[in-house]
Image (cartoon, rainbow, N blue to C red):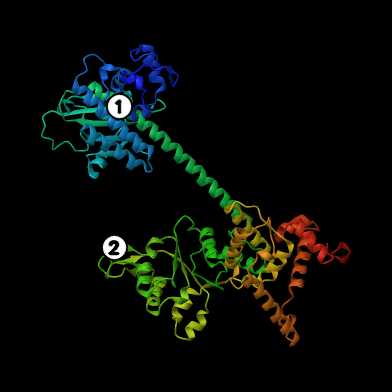
Amino acid sequence: MIFPAGLCGEPVLNKTCFGIDYCSKYDHTDNYYSKLKHYISLAGILTSIALLNCDAAAGGPLLIWRKIMGIQTANIAPAGRLTEGLELLALHRITELIGTAVHLETTLTNILKVLHDTLRMERATLLLLDEKTQCLTIRASCGLSEAEEMRGVYKPNEGVCGQIFQSRSPFVVPDIHSEPLFLNRTGARSSISKTKTSFLGVPVQVNGEPVGVLTVDRLFGMEVSFEEDIRFLTVLSTLISQFLTLHTAIRKKEEILLEENRSLKARLHGRHDGHFIIGHSKPMQDVFSIISKIASSSVTALLLGESGTGKELVARAIHEAGNRRDKAFVKVNCAALPETLLESEMFGHERGAFTGAHATRPGRFELADNGTIFLDEIGEMPLALQAKMLRVLQEKQFERIGGSKTFDVDVRIIAATNVSLEKAVAKGQFRPDLYYRLNVVPIILPPLRDRKEDIPALFNHFLVMSNKRNSKKLSLTSELLDFLVSYPWPGNVREMQNLVERMVILAEGERLTLADLTPDILASVRDYADKMKGEAVEGQVVEKRGRQSLYDIELAEVKAALKRHGGVQVRAARELGLTPRQMGYRIRKYKLSRFEGIY
C-alpha cells in the first residue's frame, strides 16, 4: 500500500482507502488510527519506504507508524526518525525475502541476516520447538557457527529462552554477565570483550500457541530503547509465524498430492496386472508371471528382446514389486558413453584421477546401494570394463578410478540387451563368465507384432495420454484400428508411442483416419503384404510355418473373449481394449452368432 498524498501534508483528499475516509491531513484521531491499524496490512506499510523523506511532524508515514505501534509522537528526535527509517527498511527487505521464499531454512537465515546488516543486531537466532524431541533447537541464525548452532538446544522450561517460550512474553537481559538464567549454551559470546551485552527475546506464536523464540544481542549505543527493539522484534516474529504457517500449509498440500499420486499409481498398478504394463496377451502374461516370481528376491535378471519392447519398463516393474521399492532405481546406458567415461560413470573417480577430475565423484553403483541398477545395452560394454563388472557381480566390491579404497555395495542388477549375447560370446566380444552371471533369469520380451491383441489397448492408452497433453479429444476410426493390427511395428511400442503423438499433433479432424498416417508407414505395410502374398504363392504358406493369418487371430480372440464373459459384449470389449461399437463391428464382420456355439 502506498500512503495517500494527503498523509504527507499536501492537499485535502476526499477518497476512501481500505474503508477509511481521509477528510483532513490533521484528522489523526484515535478512532482513525484504530481503523488504520485494523485495515492496513504490515506488508503495505513496508512499501512506503519511498516516502521516508516526508516530514514526520507533518503527518508523514513515520508518524503514522509510531502511532499505530503506540509510540509517543512528541518531540521526535532525528535519531529516532533514523532508527524508524532503518526499521522500515529492514521490514521491507524481509517481506521481499518472504515473498520470494522457496526453502524454509535458507529464507529464515536471510531474514536474520537483515537484522545484522540493517539494524546491527548481533547473533540473531530463531529457535523452534522440535516435535520429536520437544526441545527448542536453532533452525536459523546469523553470527553463529555450525557447531554453536548444534549446542543451542534448550528444554521448554530451561534458561531465558525457556522462560520466553513458556510465558509467551518478551524478555530483556540488560547485561548477560549478571543474569543467572542466561546459559550461553552455544558458547558464541565467550570471546566478547565488551563488559555489557544486552540480550532480547520474543516468542513466536502460531494461532496463539508458542512454537519458538526469536533472540538478538544488542551491542551499540543506548539511544535506541529496549522498548522499541522489543516492539520491532514482536512485529518480525508475527511475520515469521505467518511464514511458518504458510510453509506448513504448502507442505501439507504437497503431502496430499504425493498421497494422491501414490493412490493413482496403485490404481494403475492394479489395472495392468500389477506391473504398470499394458498387456493381456499370452506372451505378456508369461512375462508378468516371471516378474511376480523374482520380484521379492535379489536375483539378477537379463531382459532380452528387440529395441522398443519396454525393457526399462519391465526393469522398473521388477524393482517396484520387490522389497527394494523404497530405495534408488538407477539407470545406466552402456552404449551412450565411451569406455573411459562409462567406467567413471559406473564406479566413480577420485579427485585428480584424470584430466578434468576436479572433485571426487561417486558412481552409479554407490548411488544404487541397497537399491536396483539397470544396465541397458549391456552387450555394448567394452571387454576391459566387463572384468570389473564381473567382480561387482561376484564379490559386491569395487574401487573408484584413481582410488585404493574398496567399497562394498548391495545392489540388485537388471541388465538388458537387444543383441544376442551368445553370438557375442562366440565371437569373443563378450566374456562368457559375465554372460553366465547375468543370465540367471532371462526374460524374453515379445515384439509387438507377436502380441497383436494388445495393440488396441496400447494405442488407446497412448491416445488418451496424448490428447491430455495436447488438449484434444481425438478418437480413431475402425479402419485405422484394423490397419494398426496388421502393421508389423518394426519399432515396437516406442514406434507406436511416437506415431500417436505425431498423429494427434498434426490431425485436422476430430477422428484419426488412415490419411493421418505417414507415407512411409503405408508403404511398409504394402511391402509386408506383398511379401506375405509372395510366400504364399511359392508354397510357403503362413500356416505351414505354424502361424495364422491376421483374420484368424482376431476371430479367435473375439470368440474367446465372448466365451469368457458369457456373451456379454461390453465386458469382452473392455478386456480386448475395444469400445462396444468396435466390438459390434467385429461381430458383424465375422458374422458371429450364438447358434455357432460361440457362447
Name the spot of residue 234 as percent of width and height, x first: 31, 26
Q: Is residue 526 left or right of residue 209?
A: right
10 vs 118, left or right, is right
**Pointer 2: what residue?**
360
**How much space separates mark 2 and mark 1, taking CA atoms?**
53 Å
Q: How many numbered marks does the figure carry? A: 2
Residue at figure coordinates x 39%, y 19% from the top left: 36
Pointer 1 residue: 51
Label 1: few (<14), some (14–19) or many (≥20) C-alpha neighbours in 10 Å: some
**Residue 504, how many percent across, how many down?**
62, 59
Looking at the image, is 414 positioned above or below residue 182?
below
Locate residue 224: give its quadrant.
top left
Residue 567 image offset from top left, x and y in percent: 81, 58
**Element on which disc 2 rests:** loop
Q: Amino acid at mark 1?
A: Leu
Q: Nearer the viewer, mark 2 or mark 1?
A: 1
Residue that appears at 26% across and 20% down: 56
What label sits on residue 577 in the rendered view?
none
Counting from the top left corner in percent of width and height, residue 533 is at: 73, 81
As shown in the figure, which amino acid type bears the numbered disc 2?
Answer: Thr
- Lower sequence index among marks 2 and 1: 1
The structure residue drawn at horizontal position 52% and vertical position 58%, both measured from the top left corner, is 320
Closer to us: 67 or 565: 67
The reply to whether residue 105 is visible in this rendering is: yes
